[in-house]
Image (cartoon, grey):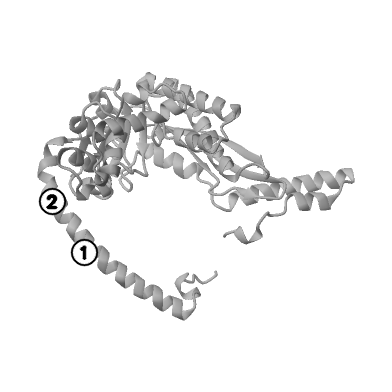
Amino acid sequence: MAEWISEWVKLPQDLQHRFFELAEEESQRLNQTIQMVEKEIQKLKQSLHSYIDKLPNVDLVSKVAAVDSSRSLRLSERLGIRYGVFASGIIYIKGFEREEVFEAGVFKRRQAFSEEKSKFFFDLLTTYVERKLALKALPNSDLVIIDGSFFSFLYSALKIKKQGLYSKEEEKIVQEIFQDTEALLKSGKVIGIIKRSHTRVIGGYLALKYGNNLFTSIIDKLILSLIMPARSIFNYHKLIGDKVVHIYNYIARHASTQLKNILQKAESDVYALFEYLKLDPSEFKNLRRMQVRAYDYAPPCEIEYPSRIEVGKLLEWIAQPNFFNEATNLPMALDLVDNMVNLSTKFTDEFVNEVEGRVLEMIDKNGGNREAVRVFFSLLNPQKLYY
């Protein structure tokens, strides 16, 4: 077995020494920051206490489905074509019973096409497949869980359109994802789990009341990790009413600029996305969020859900036995499907190599030109092949 070698010791000694110095400087700075943040959060704890409720104990076991996908972290850059692969799946769980459904797909674009457009369109394609699977899961489950926010895919569409690359193909797939998302929301039995949360509602709320503050630059998940006990929930609706969290995120982001009428400006900017893409924001306006902490060992789990799901019904689903994974504080079903569809960084190149090998076999049988195949599959930039 090869001996593990730290990346640090592979560097020249002078660089190692400098990085040790930087690590020491950074650790001292962070230590001071953490102590200051913790002190301020303890002051905030009392005012947030009334917004934290207990997660009830529920004996009823529901059938839960989770949908997720994994795609190439990077596209395989070849002279002839740009390749990516993705895997998607559904896992159904009810008690100790489990069912699985998986799908695989390939994404390809000619090298002449924009790399940025390829990346964003690949994002849209995987979301498209996830929505179709979620719709497929609806009739067979009491609750369906998707990974991420319901309308986050619109930001990929926005980036494509702002680059002037929003053709009929992109518009068509965005429209279909949007319609599928609306159908999922209208079912009243689908929630989204925000794993990589950037939500800063607490800082935005405080900024609207008192002006710029420390918490506008701290995500809620960090704040609530130091405040929420095990088996508790923090419902944003109790704090900000019917407004979507995105509005308060905007306020937090721009609090230091001292904008006049910042609430109206925030609302205008948040809904401008839908106007720009010519989409109806009605279902988006009805979205709510809550943070749930089932266990002490991990940060709370951020859940997005439509207002048509009553909070009591939502709690009945998420408070059932073994709904959350004790190690991650995320829904067990979502963790399972995420692990099962996960594709490694190397897999895309292995897939393309398999395609190349099969093409070579066909060329040999038909007396074709092997050199043309070799050139077509040559790496565009061999230096960027990371392992």
Helix, strand, or loop for circle 2?
helix
Give the numbered dot on residue 32: 1
Of residue 120 and residue 211, the one placed in the foreground of this image is: 211
1 or 2: tag closer to the N-terminus: 1
Residue for point 59% across, 45% down: 115
Above or below, 41 against 153 in this view is below
Q: Left or right: where does residue 5 sit relative to residue 231?
A: right
Tag 2: amino acid: Gln
Q: Position of residue 298 (x, y in %)?
A: 28, 49
Circle 1 or circle 2, nearest the eye: 1
The residue that mark 2 highlights is: 42
Residue at 51% across / 42% down in the picture? Answer: 70
Label 1 crowd (10 A; few <14 / some 14-19 / many >=20): few
* Residue type indicated by callout 1: Gln
Residue that appears at 27% across and 39% down: 251
User: Where, quadrant-wise, is the N terminus in this rendering?
Assistant: bottom right
Pinpoint residue 380: horizontal percent, then vertical percent.
68, 54
Q: Is residue 288 shown above or below 373?
A: above
Foreground residue, 81 or 52?
81
Q: Is 122 left or right of 185, judged from the image as shown?
A: right
Residue 218 visible in image: no
Label 1 secondary element: helix
Quadrant in which the C terminus appears: bottom right
Q: Residue at x 53, y 47 (%)?
A: 343
